[in-house]
Amino acid sequence: MIFSTLDTITRRYLLEKGLPIHWYLEILVHSSSAIRELSFDTLKIVNSVRLPVSSYGSVDLPQDFVDDLAVCVAVGDSISQIPKQDRINPIRIHENLTGEFTPYTTTQSDGSQDFAAFPGIWNWYWNVNSYGEPTGRLFGSSGGTAQGYKLLKERRQIQLTDNFKNSNIVLLYISDGQRADNATQVETMAQQAIQAWCDWKRSPNAAIKDSYEAATFYNEKRLLRGRLNDLTKTDILNIIRNSYTGAPKS
């Protein structure tokens, strides 16, 4: 993958348009605005960061956070994604004496207490014959995990469930692209879209989204999105083949 800096893109634009260096700052501002616009749905600058979990199970969001892609926990050299749980209470509780936020106490019961030397959910060992074989009629089993998280943008935090045991998480998120300067690196394929944005914002039709300049930018943006799509024929065939399952028959 090849990258270009905003400084290179800005100087190339000035050279192509025959403008003096005095226009550098204006074009640089327009280019950084283009990065912000393209970051939402096309470039999607994805950042990954390890964040600590507070004593009451919350995680502060990064300053350039726009949207979450995944909240994960580190497992060796891999990461395991945890699901969203909309049932999490967004209201925090605090200790009356100190005023410190405190975690909720667990009130869930999964019926997994040991009974008569049967570990776990003992009632699942009920319908068995004298050989220890299940005789059926076992209903209501559910899967999944009770752990999870909820994104609370009003608090600028992620709240985890009360049974979360890890001391940190790995957050994959989309950046707002606002932390851009002349050293910011951008995919070279986005250069034409950035230049089209600069043409639009420098024109008398800067506030008109139906103008010729705006249409040119959106066409370049559409072309950029197609170029960035890395889906290949091999990937499509693999997805289709993975959708088929087989069952051995005796």
Image (tube, grey):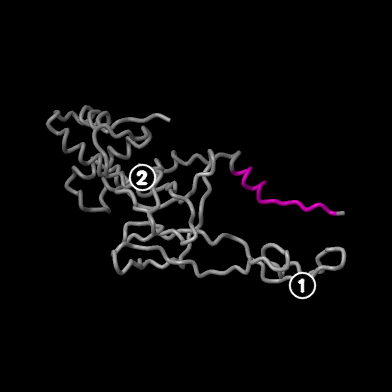
Residue toward you, 73 or 95: 95
Residue 226 x, y percent position in the rendering:
44, 42
Question: Does 195 appear above or below 15?
Answer: below
Left or right placement of residue 172 versus residue 32 in this view: right
In the rendered image, the quadrant that contains the C terminus is bottom right
Q: Amino acid at mark 1?
A: Arg
* In this rendering, the label closer to the viewer, 2 or 1: 1
Residue at (70% x, 51% y) in the render: 244
Question: Does 199 appear above or below 124?
Answer: above
Query: Which numbered disc covers residue 219?
Result: 2
Boundaries of the magenta span? 236-249
Question: Does 65 appear above or below 99?
Answer: above
Residue 23 x, y percent position in the rendering:
14, 34
Query: Which numbered disc covers residue 137?
Result: 1
At mark 2, the secondary structure is helix
Q: Is 246 one of the magenta-colored residues?
A: yes
